[in-house]
């Protein structure tokens, strides 16, 4: 199937070129849809490619309005072939409905737009660590990491192939040319580079070639950053203006990178994401890294979930960002059980930039602005809300045009977060003649701080510090302040801390699957950057940097992808689920003060709804002892358990399936973590549920593991048997975990629920295999 697959995905590109001619219609009544077809209903003696394409055109023709003289083939935006069979096309609502009812059609759903998972805007900045988490080993050579993102800036030193052997012979991918990209830019590090814009342009109209590049080239920065984080070559003396200086290297510094550009100025479209998955599977990647997401939709309408299923089936490890919608609960996205859902936490490095007030009070803050001596002298201080030219609300947030220059000139302006970008506020202050800016969190943002690459002397302080500054301004006749830029600070404690912005559980789609899965470094990460935009990513920012510091679950995801590549290199026979299990069961829930990880938003203890199984520990993941392994059929059983029909499940499997005769339960999916959901009942004093699991021995051939449980007083967790004895590597043993909780009414509020957390730990004295257990009574 490999060859036709390659040809077919190219079809998407050629169709696009054809579609840009006069037949390209942006009729406001139609929009882009993805159509999934049961391929087994298509039979033909002609070649596969001609058969599917002409069959899909016929299907389109048959639902077209009779007065339409469009050429239907011009409207096949992408044809899909590996992860599922089908196509995308612009359809009216009526045409989509007609297709839905056609024989052999499994599903028709509207294309949706996703966004890069950098927190709020691409202006997020931060710091990276070259120690602790990044292993010194050379694991990852010959492993291929597919990065689905905004493309790559191939000239970056992180993409040098110095010291790397030839491209792995099994590689079937290639490098696509464009206006400013060609095959000469690929090497033994970047071994593939393609772009997918047909869905994007069909949905939003032709791209603006002045600011975008119809090629794998990254004009945004995000894709360059994530690719270099996962698998960048080592670069010595990397820094952003001397901040975070050190050797920058990807997690798997010898792994090869295959670039799939799916994100553009106006977002990342599902139809293109599906096409990229389709191509990556055909090309032969080993790992897929995807720092993109949107809202949660049912698995069968989610092209990331569907694409990741097809990849998992081919043995590909898929790691996705959890999202930056925290600190609210139930915000986690990319939650299919066959992907690793990655939360974000801090490193033990920070960029302090405090503020000293005229009354001798000092407020701590963070910034990536490189201060000079003249920035550190007392200067007049005003609050944006007090110096507004028109609207006080706008002034307090320092929105465009809201500040009165005569009141701002030469002053430091205090601005509230919200309404516009953090770095953009600095531009407003600068435009009004201000000298510097103190940005403050509001109570909604709490105390979580993000260091930014400001264009004038500026820092960000927490909500409490901001309130202190406001009352100082009110109480003083001539308020003044000065900055104290502190460079790079190391050994910050506590660390890691779960980032405020990191999306949280519980899982909104399948509460019985605990999400997120893991947390990793995602705050202030230094990695390679594009030469096309400045570090803030804003149009007016004319600075150019080779490395940038940004934050988001977008940054933590490629750390886990790179680790997946290392584990694939170390254990070539492990399934994606075994690799995921190894990463999860060896994670730690403790920080560098030996306390439970804290939540940055509240500075109280975080839970598995924040960090999943805990913070990743790469070196321990190499030797997990036991793994909770799963086959593609186990995931099919999961889809049966959530109530999907075999026809619906075929959307994922691309082939007919049967559900087990006896009903399967989500509780029995061999997941490396546990989530009990118990229904409160006034007639049942004790609520009970159970889980079955099977562990595979990947540690010492002869070993005995004993179970221990850590649980709150009012929860009882038992394991049967309490000991598992193995006499061979690869041997499997099963156990049952029973959870009992008192059926207390949590609250009289309808829909209220309370979750408590326990842990199961298996150990043979050498390995520790730990799983979180969420127990929710609702
Ligand atoms: C390929 O692109 C590079 C960089 O843009 C350029 O220097 C080179 O001339 C191009 N080569 C070809 C064959 O177009
Ligand atoms: C493309 O972007 C440039 C730069 O922002 C802008 O000046 C130009 O008007 C845009 N062109 C179109 C067709 O939108
Ligand atoms: C601030 O501290 C300095 C030196 O410690 C002292 O001279 C000054 O009086 C203090 N000012 C206030 C307002 O407390
Ligand atoms: C400021 O503008 C916003 C948005 O138009 C409006 O909601 C608000 O009422 C205005 N506030 C004042 C004080 O005019
Ligand atoms: C587990 O729970 C199921 C469903 O409630 C029940 O049928 C089964 O007997 C239980 N198994 C054990 C070992 O408790
Ligand atoms: C494991 O134990 C069995 C039986 O005691 C023995 O035959 C075998 O050699 C042992 N294997 C290893 C690797 O020690």
Image: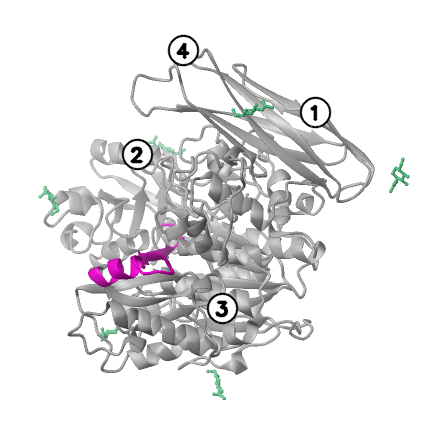
Quadrant of the image containing the N terminus: bottom right
Q: Earlier in the sequence, mark 3 or mark 2?
A: 3
Residue 443 image label: 2
**At x 25% / y 60%, what residue is drawn?**
98
Q: Mark 4 or mark 2, which is nearer to you?
A: 4
Q: Nearer the viewer, residue 57 or 775?
A: 57
Give the left or right position of residue 370, taking residue 721 as reference.
left
Magenta segment includes 111: yes
Quadrant in the rendering for residue 73: bottom left
Q: Is residue 618 visible?
A: yes
- From this view, report whether residue 342 is shown above or below residue 776: below
Q: Secondary structure at mark 4?
A: loop
Q: Earlier in the sequence, mark 3 or mark 1?
A: 3
Q: CA distance from mark 3 to mark 1?
A: 45 Å
Pointer 4 or 3: first along the chain: 3
Q: Nearer the viewer, mark 1 or mark 2?
A: 1
Q: Nearer the viewer, residue 727 or 700?
A: 727
Determine which of the numbered discs, if any, sits on residue 683 in the image: 4
Span shown in magenta: 94-119
Name the quadrant of the C terminus: top left
Mark 1 / mark 2, whichever is N-terminal: 2
Mark 4 or 1, nearer chain start:
4
Secondary structure of the residue carrying numbered label 2: loop
- Give the x, y percent position of residue 175: 51, 77
- Label 3 belongs to which residue? 279
Q: Earlier in the sequence, mark 4 or mark 2?
A: 2
Give the class, few, some or many, for how many residues have Cα within 10 Å of label 3's Cα (few <14, many ≥20).
many
Location of residue 133 with respect to 446 vertically, above or below: below
Ligand 6, image quadrant it occupies = top right
Q: Is residue 549 left or right of residue 360?
A: right
Measuring from the top left, give residue 717's x and y in whole percent.
Answer: 58, 21
Q: Nearer the viewer, residue 468 or 331?
A: 331
């Amino acid at each position: 199937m490999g060859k036709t697959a390659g040809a077919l995905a190219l079809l998407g590109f050629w169709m696009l070129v054809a579609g840009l001619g006069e037949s390209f219609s942006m009729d406001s009544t139609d929009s882009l849809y993805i159509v999934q077809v049961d391929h087994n209903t298509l039979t033909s003696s002609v070649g596969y490619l001609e058969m599917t394409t002409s069959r899909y055109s016929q299907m389109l023709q048959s639902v077209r309005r009779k007065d339409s003289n469009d050429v239907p083939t011009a409207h096949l935006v992408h044809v899909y072939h590996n992860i599922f069979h089908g196509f995308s096309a612009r359809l009216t609502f009526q045409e989509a409905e007609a297709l839905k009812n056609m024989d052999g059609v499994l599903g028709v759903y509207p294309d949706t737009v996703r966004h890069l998972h950098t927190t709020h805007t691409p202006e997020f900045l931060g710091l990276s660590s070259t120690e602790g988490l990044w292993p010194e080993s050379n694991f990852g050579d010959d492993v291929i990491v597919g990065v689905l993102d905004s493309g790559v800036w191939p000239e970056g030193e992180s993409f040098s192939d110095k010291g790397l052997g030839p491209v792995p012979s099994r590689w079937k991918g290639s490098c696509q040319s464009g206006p400013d990209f060609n095959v000469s830019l690929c090497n033994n590090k970047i071994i593939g580079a393609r772009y997918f814009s047909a869905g994007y342009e069909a949905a939003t109209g032709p791209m603006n070639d002045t600011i975008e590049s119809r090629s794998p080239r990254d004009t945004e920065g995000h894709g360059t950053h994530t690719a270099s984080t996962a698998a960048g070559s080592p670069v010595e003396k990397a820094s952003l203006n001397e901040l975070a200086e050190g050797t920058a290297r990807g997690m798997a510094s010898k792994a090869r990178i295959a670039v799939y550009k799916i994100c553009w100025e106006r977002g990342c479209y599902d139809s293109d994401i599906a096409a990229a998955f389709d191509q990556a599977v055909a090309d032969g990647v080993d790992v897929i890294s995807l720092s993109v997401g949107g809202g949660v939709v049912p698995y069968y309408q989610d092209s990331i979930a569907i694409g990741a299923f097809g990849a998992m089936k081919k043995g590909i490890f898929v790691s996705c960002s959890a999202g930056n919608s925290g600190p609210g609960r139930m915000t986690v996205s990319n939650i299919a059980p066959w992907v690793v859902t990655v939360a974000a936490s801090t490193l033990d490095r920070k960029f302090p930039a405090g503020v000293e007030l005229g009354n001798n009070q000092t407020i701590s803050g963070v910034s990536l602005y490189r201060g000079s001596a003249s920035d550190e002298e007392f200067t007049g201080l005003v609050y944006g809300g007090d110096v507004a030219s028109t609207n006080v609300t706008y002034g307090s947030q320092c929105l465009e045009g809201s500040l009165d220059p005569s009141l701002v000139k030469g002053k430091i302006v205090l601005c509230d977060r919200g309404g516009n970008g953090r770095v953009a506020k600095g531009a407003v202050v600068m435009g009004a003649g201000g000298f510097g800016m103190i940005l403050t969190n509001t109570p909604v943002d709490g105390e979580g701080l993000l260091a930014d690459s400001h264009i004038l002397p500026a820092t960000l302080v927490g909500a409490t510090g901001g309130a202190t500054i406001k009352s100082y301004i009110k109480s003083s006749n001539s308020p003044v302040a000065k900055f104290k830029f502190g460079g790079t600070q190391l050994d910050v404690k506590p660390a890691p801390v779960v980032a405020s912005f990191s999306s949280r559980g519980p899982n909104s789609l399948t509460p019985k699957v605990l999400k997120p899965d893991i947390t990793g470094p995602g705050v202030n990460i230094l990695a390679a950057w594009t030469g096309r935009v400045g570090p803030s990513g804003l149009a007016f920012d004319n600075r150019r940097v080779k490395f940038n510091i940004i934050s988001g679950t977008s940054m933590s995801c490629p750390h886990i992808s790179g680790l997946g590549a290392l584990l694939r290199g170390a254990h070539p026979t492990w399934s994606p689920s075994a690799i995921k299990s190894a990463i999860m069961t060896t994670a730690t829930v403790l920080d560098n003060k030996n306390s439970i990880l804290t939540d940055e938003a509240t500075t109280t203890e975080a839970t598995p709804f924040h960090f999943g199984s805990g913070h990743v520990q790469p070196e321990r993941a190499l030797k997990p002892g036991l793994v909770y392994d799963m086959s593609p059929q186990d995931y099919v059983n999961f889809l049966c358990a959530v109530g999907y029909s075999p026809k619906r499940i075929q959307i994922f499997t691309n082939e007919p399936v049967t559900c087990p005769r006896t009903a399967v339960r989500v509780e029995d999916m061999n997941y490396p973590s546990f989530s009990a959901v118990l229904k409160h009942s006034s007639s049942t004093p004790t609520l009970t549920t159970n889980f079955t699991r099977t562990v595979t021995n990947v540690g010492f051939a002869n070993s005995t593991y004993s179970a221990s449980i850590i649980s709150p007083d009012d929860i009882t967790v038992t394991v049967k048997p309490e000991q598992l004895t193995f006499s061979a590597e690869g041997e499997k043993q099963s156990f049952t975990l029973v959870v009992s909780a008192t059926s207390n009414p949590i609250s009289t509020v309808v829909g209220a629920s309370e979750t408590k957390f326990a842990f199961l730990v298996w150990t043979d004295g050498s390995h520790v295999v730990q799983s979180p257990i969420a127990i929710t009574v609702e």
